[in-house]
Image (cartoon, rainbow, N blue to C red):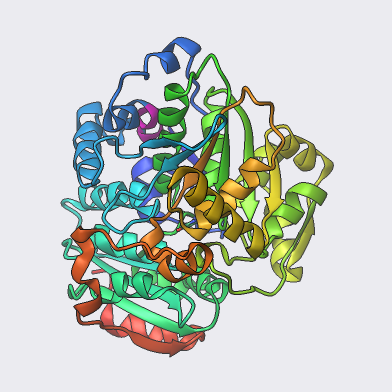
Amino acid sequence: MRYHSTRGDAPVLGFRDVTLAGLASDGGLYVPERWPSFSTEQIAAMRGLSYAETAVQVMLPFVGDDLTEAELRALCTQAYDRFAHAAVTPLVQLDAQNWLLELFHGPTLAFKDVALQLLGLLFEKFLVGSDAPLTIVGATSGDTGSAAIDAVAGRHGVDIFMLHPKGRVSEVQRRQMTTVLAPNVHNIAIEGSFDDAQALVKAMFNDADFSGRFRLSAVNSINWARLMAQVVYYFYAAVRLGGPERPVAFAVPTGNFGDVFAGYVAAKMGLPIAKLIVATNVNDILHRALSSGDYSTGIVTPTAAPSMDIQVSSNFERLLADLAGGPIAEQMRGFEASKAMRLTNAQQQGAAALFVSDRVEPDDMNEAMRWAYAETGEVIDPHSAIGLAAARRAGLPADVPIVTLATAHPAKFADAVERATGNRPHIPARLGDLHERQERYDVLPASFVAIVAYIAERAKPRP
Ligand SMILES: *Cc1c(COP(=O)(O)O)cnc(C)c1O
């Protein structure tokens, strides 16, 4: 399998190099040259498989010759053994139509673990025998950071520099990052928003001098391997609810469009998906783009669902390129210059075939948390509640099961859950002493010069 950039001007790479590179050198994102496709029989044959084995089947076409099936199986087994639930991503029924897919049973309690536990192992595997240390730089709205740090802490040949917006992640999220004291982990609180942090990371990749000195890699969902790992749970859930004979819908609380793009990939691979419901909070650029073709950034409003407080959704570029049938360098350059663009008619119509979108206000999010608790006893987090609110009012036919992706454990956002439901969720015992552990991080301005100087002082350059 070969991978091309969405902007058409970067080297064509195989899976190993795409995984290590993260972002393409022309500022675009890597996508596979074609979508592998599964027959109805192949999908039906996934019904009895464990999560790890489903992962092997779904991901094998993407890894090409860079991993044997046995190697991929060993990595999947190791990654998903660290989950605290035997089903890895269990389904929970809420009412006659609605289900939750709990993606938060990994080490840091958010769905990011599903992909990052595997990515950490892929890095290690692909770096064996290489003398150039990897410098991972990432921006996080909270959950990517802790999941990535957990996945690479103490690993040989890798340094990680994680930028988070100061004061805009929850205390549990911050502590999950800053209490990891391994010498290869560097936490930076930047004085700015998540979008500022993400723009700084992109600028580092695009800076020829800096990216020449260090072997940079990305763990944000711009890294293809992460999206690939997320495609798995769409198959895993759908075949348990009657797929492939019966189409299933998914409601996805969305920020960077990574999680829901993985659903699009699953559909492209042949999984019958009735609808993908893109649920945003008041930071609604994706809802505006999908409902009216207007992809223009606004000001980021901090909310109780901070992992969705985003006004530039990196992975949307992958969808737009796929719907356009090829590179979209000009469209993206226009967007980067003016912070606004219109989808073409082809892009709007293509998206409308599979996606619907919704913007969920704080009151409706709180109401969804209360409903789930009162009617089912389930305590859900604010992000999952946004997905559930959108699912319950999507108006889909009653015979279509709707799976809401439950993206975080409620204890990660205990204050917001307690405000909405009066019930304070507790951190699982396996993370119990988080609030006593020592923290370590540095505060820097949202300045390219300052961040680059900080990293250059601490990272190991190419030999
Ligand atoms: C990252 C995250 C999201 C958004 O996922 P994207 O792939 O960025 O769309 C939603 N909920 C939680 C809890 C997250 O951590």
Q: Is residue 151 left or right of residue 313?
A: left
Using the image, determine if residue 240 lies above or below residue 9: above
Q: Main secondary structure of the magenta part?
A: helix
- Rendered residue at 24%/49% (across/down): 121
Using the image, determine if residue 197 lies above or below residue 443: above
Say if residue 212 shows up in the picture. yes
| Residue 177, quarter of picture | bottom left
- Rendered residue at 21%/37% (across/down): 77
Q: Is residue 344 left or right of residue 359?
A: right
Which range is magenta?
A: 58-63
Q: Position of residue 102 (x, y in %)?
A: 40, 44
Q: Position of residue 445 (x, y in %)?
A: 48, 89
Q: Position of residue 171 (x, y in %)?
A: 37, 76
The answer to if 90 sits in the magenta stretch is no
- Rendered residue at 16%/62% (across/down): 156
| Residue 339, quarter of picture | bottom right
